Amino acid sequence: MTDLRFTKLQGLGNDFLVIEVDDVGTLRAAGEIARELCNRRLGAGADGVVFVTRAPHDNADFASRIFNSDGSEAGVSGNGTRCVAAYCYHAGLWSKAAVRIATAAGVKTGRLISRDKSLFEFEFDMGAPRLGSEDVPMALDRPLERVVSYPLNLAGESLRVTCLSMGNPQTVIFVPDLEAVNLDDIGPLIENHPVFPDRTNVEFARVISRDRIDILIWERGAGHTLSSGTGSCASAVAAALNGFTDRRVTVRTEGGVLRVEWKKAGTVALTGSAEVIYEGRWLRG
């Protein structure tokens, strides 16, 4: 692992190291590489590493795999996929108006809206949310078609959670005051709750109006992050399922604003920015 070249990008403070490889299907030691590179004191520092290559099939232009800072592999990342798209344009690998990126959770199609030097804005089709408890997945006595305001026992208290999958497990809790949330304490408790056999991403959401919510994010395998694309999508879907908002909302994260629309056809559109920060070489063996 010497002289490994990477490009750092960020989507609203959710940062990734993108590495171009010959074949994402034959990666070796990818989790170990992610842990080392993502270390913010001993490495380059990031929430995750995304490996990208030209797609070997006709239904996508590029293929990607994403690994969290703890070395675990994620099914998909909304911000990470936008960062991959921005890298492909920045590196001169792509110039068409739309780009298709294969992820472990399926192909995501993005449309380039604007570009200002190293700053890009995309709208991505993130696919349809899966709402059943078995899709999340959750270990329940009986499966539920929808997990809306479900009572989750946590340290002797009951939290009302809405759960779904955006290609990765998501748990959303609506609260009246985000400042009262001790995210560093409660985030890992929910992420590792026994009801979630594959762990879960966690979002605390406050409804501001019919078309705006604010959220705090605890990501599975990465911890407290400033933004999350799939987490923003899940929060918007959860707000609509609970009747708190309409299906088109602005989601304000700590890192900035994303726009989410849960379309009548069932798919979720995610619009936001991605920025190329710097290019580097990893020299440690």
Image: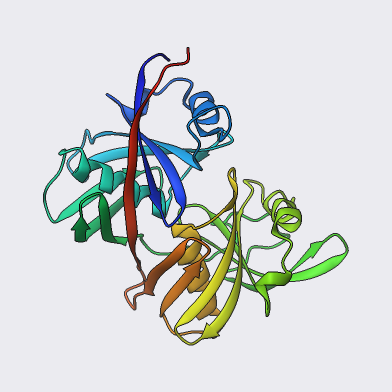
Residue 64 in view in this figure = yes
Is residue 214 depicted above or below 203 in this figure? below
92 relative position to 263: left or right = left
Instruction: Tell me which colouring the rendered structure shows.
Output: rainbow
Between 48 and 7, the one lying in front of the other is 7
Is residue 148 depicted above or below 58 in this figure? below
Q: Residue furthest left?
A: 96
| Residue 131 location (% of width, % of height) | 52, 66
Between 257 and 49, the one lying in front of the other is 257
| Residue 29 location (% of width, % of height) | 48, 21
**Quadrant of residue 222 in the image?**
top right
| Residue 55 location (% of width, % of height) | 23, 36
**Quadrant of residue 136 in the image?**
bottom right
153 relative position to 114: left or right = right
User: Going 69% across and 70% down the picture, which residue do you hit?
Assistant: 179
Quarter in which the N terminus is drawn = top left
User: Going 42% across and 78% down the picture, which residue do you hit?
Assistant: 249
185 relative position to 266: left or right = right
| Residue 260 location (% of width, % of height) | 39, 71
User: Going 73% across and 60% down the picture, which residue do you hit?
Assistant: 141
